[in-house]
Amino acid sequence: MEPFRFHNPTTLYYGKGQIEKHLADEVLKIGRRVLLLYGGGSIKRFGLYDKVMNILKDAGVTVFELGGVEPNPRLTTVYKGIEMCRQNDIDLILAVGGGSVLDCGKAIAMGVKFDGDVWDIYQRKAQATGALPLGTILTHAATGSEMNAGGVITNWETKEKLGAGSPYTYPVFSFCDPENTFTVPRDQTVYGICDMLAHCFEHYFHSTRHAPLQKHLIEAVMRTIVEYAKRVVDNPTDYDARETIMYCSTMALNGMISMGIVGDWACHAMEHEVSAIYDIPHGGGLAILFPHWMEYVKSTDPSRFASLAKSVFLVDGTGKSDEELADIAIEKVREFYREIGAPQRLRDYGIGDDQLERMAAQAVRFGEIGHFRKLGKEDVLNILRASL
Amino acid sequence: MEPFRFHNPTTLYYGKGQIEKHLADEVLKIGRRVLLLYGGGSIKRFGLYDKVMNILKDAGVTVFELGGVEPNPRLTTVYKGIEMCRQNDIDLILAVGGGSVLDCGKAIAMGVKFDGDVWDIYQRKAQATGALPLGTILTHAATGSEMNAGGVITNWETKEKLGAGSPYTYPVFSFCDPENTFTVPRDQTVYGICDMLAHCFEHYFHSTRHAPLQKHLIEAVMRTIVEYAKRVVDNPTDYDARETIMYCSTMALNGMISMGIVGDWACHAMEHEVSAIYDIPHGGGLAILFPHWMEYVKSTDPSRFASLAKSVFLVDGTGKSDEELADIAIEKVREFYREIGAPQRLRDYGIGDDQLERMAAQAVRFGEIGHFRKLGKEDVLNILRASL
């Protein structure tokens, strides 16, 4: 494996009843002026808003609110949040929602402590210089944002969707209660599963010479996702299934299964360009792109795909070549997406070929993408075309 | 899974060259007065002592030294360390060695900030009230102490060996360079492997109703240990193998594969009683006890053992009952220990039956032990007798 430094300071609370028991203490450790950040209002419909507000008020916390964070959170909302934090001398941002709300919280947190335009950090023109403390209450299993430092923001004016992070943007604490995901709609549940599985794929197709434990750990998460995905999609209030899928999403991207490896991340880079223009769900875009990326790069190392077939989809490899198993693995991945009802092609979102050139050019604007196989503009175009 | 709180604040550095690049910075973040703690002097023979001293001196750090920490570290050494820290106004304890040195460092760190006898914390009469910062440089893959809060200390006068920990005793930083384990003798390498595998067993035989991802994660670590153990024992300077085994030992006991589960830990409790009296290597004791414990408790849940056979030892389960697979799993465990040259019976250490009663009584002095199956004094006696 590569030499690495690992430090994940997030305090993670999992399970029923943890918010009631520990939220007030965690908030009061940091301060008494809180910016409550949330999305489209589902937390109001399903009672979480009231629960959190009551806990905060009982604890003597002054709450400022910023709702309406978009599914692909926008830079304009980030600017608004930064302004609110500065004007109201906020001690802690409490992001209640899915990955988008959490990512927006991270951008605001960095922006408050940055002397300049926070978008420069996402454009890789500057580095974060600090961040306001961020706490989170997760309501959707997908991005792993509850226990990592990264986040993705969309600049709707320039049609750019970029990720950034810093050692400052790990949430100080995160509460993950599976019951808070019971009301996530079927489609969103599916997209979340596609997203967490994609994180595993990005790790799994790494470019590191020797990392056998990481391989098995990533397979453990993928296998569990595959085992529980259909169950949670079909039975949204199945506690065990929701808990397992939620925990998979946290473990898929908190760094614990990917220490010392350099993941691929080409599909994420490509998907960001698609959803920057078409505003499609991130998980949906990933489910469309991955099988086509796999077809395109499988010859680089068929044995990696063969392992995927055997260890995750439990295919009996006896008498089969790695190339045959690679094809089986890709078919299993397609089958998995089909079974849970994920989209198959870009045209499912009404996307045609008119912006492919632009997306491909944007995808490689910082250089080639991917580590398992390096992709240039033509490669990206080929994969996008195949995904239409 | 059980509701849980997880927080592991250790900054972990892995790989060649990390000490040279980052040790000085990590030390200077904390202070300039360091207690360097080490064991029997192997770090002097193999050059690590000089390397560390040079880095510290170049950084302008004042170093105080406490060498000679015992393999089962003794309370008397802990007292000595506490005294040295207090007299010399130490900012940071830097423990360079294996688990014993690190555990001793944790005890000293807690003791310095405790108004009373630190042994009270190990006896569960008191809780830690703080700790001096501890940094570590690991030279032996075994205990996982480099990234957890626990440690075990032996009171040689009372023949008690007890573990304790607190949120304060996570190392602030730990450096794990596989090359620093190249010179670990064959026996110690074997004991280390037995110890890390035992940690996995303790997690795997948990009493938690539903924890599928944890199951697969623990299997991932066990499978990797089994794959690489023989290789590292036979080729002590095989970098990839040393790295993999070292990384397995960290992951086996840093909490990342065991969130939300209640492990068994009966074998650890029993082994502590054996080595408190006979001062045998912890890993050796565990290798002796585990197969007998497994025989004794297998009827509690044969399916758990069946999974062990299939997922870790890759046994084809077709047409076999869980009970049959359980027997196969236990035989595979025995075979594994035999192949790497681990001890098989207590008599290999010259231990007879004269102290069994005393050990059994001590093992259950805080109540029944174990969670997969609760064991009383008679159960412990039966297992110890079978292990003779």
Image (cartoon, coloured by chain):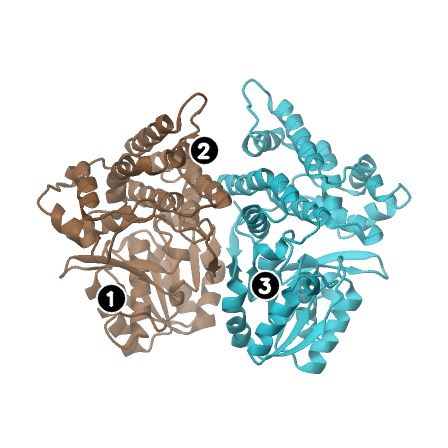
Chain colours: A cyan, B brown
Q: Quadrant of the C terminus of chain B?
A: top left
What residue is drawn where x is 77% and y is 56%? Answer: A161
Please give the residue where the numbered disc 2 appears in the rendered image: B311
Q: How many marks?
A: 3
Q: Residue furthest top?
A: A319
Position above or below: A23 against A356: below
Cα gap from disc 1 to disc 2, whole angstroms: 42 Å
Q: Which mark is residue A51?
A: none
Q: Which of the two residues, B148 or A357, is positioned nearer the viewer here?
A: B148
- A355 versus A298 height, above or below: below
The amino acid pointed to by label 2 is Ser
* Chain of the residue under the numbered disc 1 shown in the image: B
- Label 3, label 1: how far apart the Cα atoms are: 36 Å
Task: Using the numbered discs, state the Cα–Cα distance from disc 3 to disc 2 in whole angstroms.
Answer: 34 Å
x and y percentages locating residue A15 in the rendered image: 52, 57
- The answer to whether the residues at label 3 and label 1 have Cβ atoms under 8 Å apart is no
Foreground mark, 3 or 2, reads 2
* Residue A116 pos. (x, y %): 74, 73
Q: Which residue is mark 1?
A: B78
- Nearer-the-camera pick, B95 or B199: B199
- Going from the N terminus, do you reach mark 1 or mark 2 first? 1
Residue, x 30% and y 74% (percent of image)?
B114
- Which one is closest to the eye, mark 1 or mark 2? 2
- Callout 1 touching callout 2 (CB < 8 Å): no
Chain letter of disc 3?
A
What residue is rendered at 56% in x and 62% in y?
A175
Which residue in the structure is indicated by mark 3? A170
Question: Circle 2: is it few (<14), some (14-19), or many (20+) Cα within 10 Å?
Answer: some
